[in-house]
Image: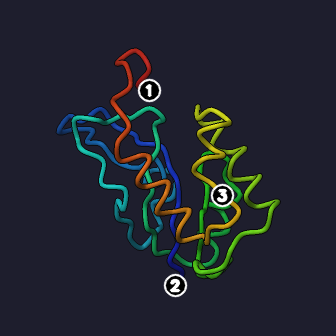
Amino acid sequence: MNKAHILTPWDGDGSEDNPYHPLLSDAFPTTQSWRDVTGQPVPNLHPDPNLLVIEVICDKETLSAIEADPRFLVIWGSDMSDKNEKPSTKIVSDIRSWLTSQSLSTSQATSIIKTSKTFEQISDELRTYLKTRPKKDKSDVP
């Protein structure tokens, strides 16, 4: 099994029938388990940007499928990288590009994702940033 930290949008409206949950759990129900490692306060859901970091345990095939899905960003995974390694300049650029496609400004993405950080430090920086994001305007929630 593989462990990975993945950026995913929130889904759900917070009701009993449709509680808040990561979109990844709907898209990949075969993941063995997931847990929210961002720790965003419920009053802030759906945050702006609408993202959270989850830790997933899944098989190699599922992790490969998640990596190929543009709705999600695998920050690190036990099959793809050591979380204590520093990413290449290309990977840093790819992460920043993905974040700007999710409504972060270029300056925000650049300040969070630094080439001198390890994959685990990048995950920590993203969790810290996302944990404090205010709730989106209701008209913006899917």
Amino acid type shown at disc 1:
Pro
Identify the residue under disc 3. Answer: 114
SS at badge 1: loop
Amino acid type shown at disc 2:
Met
Q: How many marks?
A: 3
- Farthest right residue? 90
Amino acid type shown at disc 3:
Lys
Please report the residue visible at 60 percent of the width from the left and 47 percent of the height from the top. Answer: 111
- Above or below residue 136? Residue 36 is below
Earlier-in-chain disc, 2 versus 3: 2
Looking at the figure, which quarter contains the C terminus?
A: top left
- Above or below residue 126? Residue 12 is above
Mark 1, other Cα within 10 Å: few <14 / some 14–19 / many ≥20: few
* Residue 33 percent coordinates (x, y): 38, 70
Earlier-in-chain disc, 1 versus 2: 2
In this rendering, the label closer to the viewer, 2 or 3: 3
SS at badge 2: loop
Q: Is residue 131 left or right of residue 29?
A: left
Mark 2, other Cα within 10 Å: few <14 / some 14–19 / many ≥20: some
Identify the residue under disc 1. Answer: 142
Q: Quadrant of residue 20?
A: top left
Identify the residue under disc 2. Answer: 1
Q: Is residue 31 left or right of residue 103?
A: left
- Farthest left residue? 16
Are circles 2 and 3 on residues that touch, CB within 8 Å? Answer: no
Q: Is residue 129 left or right of residue 132?
A: right
